[in-house]
Image (spheres, rainbow, N blue to C red):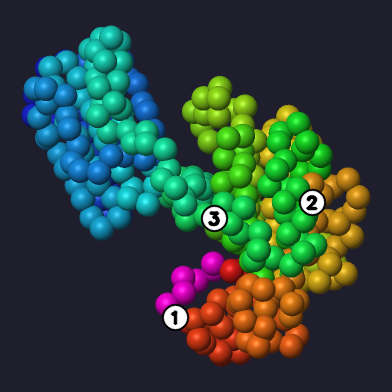
């Protein structure tokens, strides 16, 4: 075998072929595999970083960048040093993956450890934020999971945004610990703008020590595709023992069609798969909870969803009463006669009309 080209790591007797739809990124991936495939660097180690430090990549001493590809959504780098090759791939909206191949195991582990220490952002989330995961399906990569920091309000500051009974129920939920988990389904139902999404953000903050909150961006796809569902139920590949010990809460927003009374007829196997995840064979042995938000009235939901024993909590999040709205606004004269939703209260506070479309200065989804 011809020795590898020191610039690219490609032995002369290797043929490289790319199809029309492939890109520079695919070429970087292929070049990174060749030293391992050829046996020139038979040891490989990989790490995935959820967050990286700001600034450029600091490579180990003596490293040389031999390929670099970049567009608005991702960046791929291939670098080589004495006896090792590293590929760093980063989707700007997702995780960063580092793969090292080397002539010796100790070299692969040393270079990987140096890169992880140099790149990984281990700072705790700043005040007013928490970490939330996001799942979506990609035609190229299947189920994709990433974690991001989101804004969240401590429940002690947020409870006044809710009417008395839902505030009481949400307080019990926020204070829950793993030993109190009974039932796998959390159902938040009520009109739009009442704060269901905001409550889940506060829940992510309250449960951050024992539960990872993951929002599924395409729940309709989740229950139509068995492989996607199983991938999410089983969790991320490469989870540590500490991660495996944590509960996970999958958030499915606005799933009205999935859980209506006619859902079995309208959505086929989707409802059955949801129920299987919460208390069937699929959910057995997995610390997985499912939170669903819906605008539907409880009486219009499928009886299998709301039956006793299935729900960890079933909370109706409605508008504040006139008195509660007056206390929230600090002005009894400004409170609507029939009360108001949280979104309407914020509109009134800013001098807007709650019956008109939302204030464009407000971020979408804050008070769903």
**Could you tell me residue 271's position as x and y percent?**
77, 56
Closer to the camera in the image, 187 or 136: 187
User: According to the image, label 1 marks what residue?
Assistant: 360
What type of secondary structure mainly makes up the magenta span? loop
**Could you tell me residue 204's position as x and y percent?**
58, 47
Residue 87 as seen in the image, left or right of residue 66: right
User: According to the image, label 3 marks what residue?
Assistant: 153
Query: Which of the 4 image quadrants contains residue 265?
Result: bottom right
For image coordinates 54% across by 55% down, the residue present is: 153
Closer to the camera in the image, 210 or 225: 210
**Could you tell me residue 73's position as x and y percent?**
30, 55
Residue 163 as seen in the image, left or right of residue 210: right
| N-term mark: 3 or 1 | 3
For image coordinates 15% across by 39% down, the residue present is: 67
Closer to the camera in the image, 86 or 173: 173
Q: Residues within 10 Å of mark 3 (few under 14, many from 20)?
A: many
Query: Which of the 4 image quadrants contains residue 336?
Result: bottom right
User: According to the image, label 2 marks what residue?
Assistant: 313
């Amino acid at each position: 075998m011809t020795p590898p080209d020191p610039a690219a790591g490609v032995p002369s007797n290797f043929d490289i072929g790319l199809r029309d739809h492939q890109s520079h990124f695919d070429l970087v991936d292929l070049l990174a595999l060749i030293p391992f495939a050829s046996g020139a660097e038979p040891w490989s180690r990989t790490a995935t970083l959820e967050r990286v430090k700001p600034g450029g990549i600091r490579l180990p001493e003596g490293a040389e960048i031999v390929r670099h590809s970049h567009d608005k959504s991702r960046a791929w780098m291939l670098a080589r040093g004495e006896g090792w090759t590293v590929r760093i791939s980063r989707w700007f909206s997702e995780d960063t993956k580092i793969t090292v191949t080397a002539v010796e195991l100790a070299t692969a582990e040393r270079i990987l450890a140096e890169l992880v220490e140099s790149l990984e952002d281990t700072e705790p989330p700043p005040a007013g934020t928490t970490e939330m995961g996001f799942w979506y399906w990609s035609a190229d990569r299947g189920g994709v999971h990433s974690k991001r920091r989101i804004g969240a309000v401590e429940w002690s500051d947020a409870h006044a945004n809710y009417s008395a009974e839902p505030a009481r129920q949400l307080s019990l939920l926020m204070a829950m610990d793993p030993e109190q988990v009974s039932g796998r389904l959390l159902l938040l139902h009520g009109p739009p703008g009442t704060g269901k999404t905001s409550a889940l953000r506060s829940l992510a903050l309250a449960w951050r020590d024992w539960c990872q909150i993951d929002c599924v961006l395409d729940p309709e796809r989740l229950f139509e595709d068995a492989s996607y569902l199983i991938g999410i139920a089983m969790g991320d590949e490469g989870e540590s023992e500490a991660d495996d010990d944590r509960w996970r809460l999958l958030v499915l927003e606005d799933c009205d069609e999935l859980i209506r009374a006619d859902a079995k007829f309208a959505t086929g196997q989707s409802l059955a798969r949801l129920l299987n995840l919460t208390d069937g064979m699929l959910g057995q042995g997995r610390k997985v909870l499912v939170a669903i938000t819906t605008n539907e009235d409880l009486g219009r939901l499928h009886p299998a969803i709301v039956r006793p024993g299935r729900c960890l909590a079933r909370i109706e999040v409605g508008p504040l009463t006139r008195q509660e709205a007056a206390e929230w606004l600090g002005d009894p004269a400004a409170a609507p006669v029939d009360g108001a939703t949280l979104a309407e209260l914020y509109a009134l506070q800013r001098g807007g009309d709650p019956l008109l479309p939302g204030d464009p200065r407000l971020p979408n989804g804050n008070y769903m």
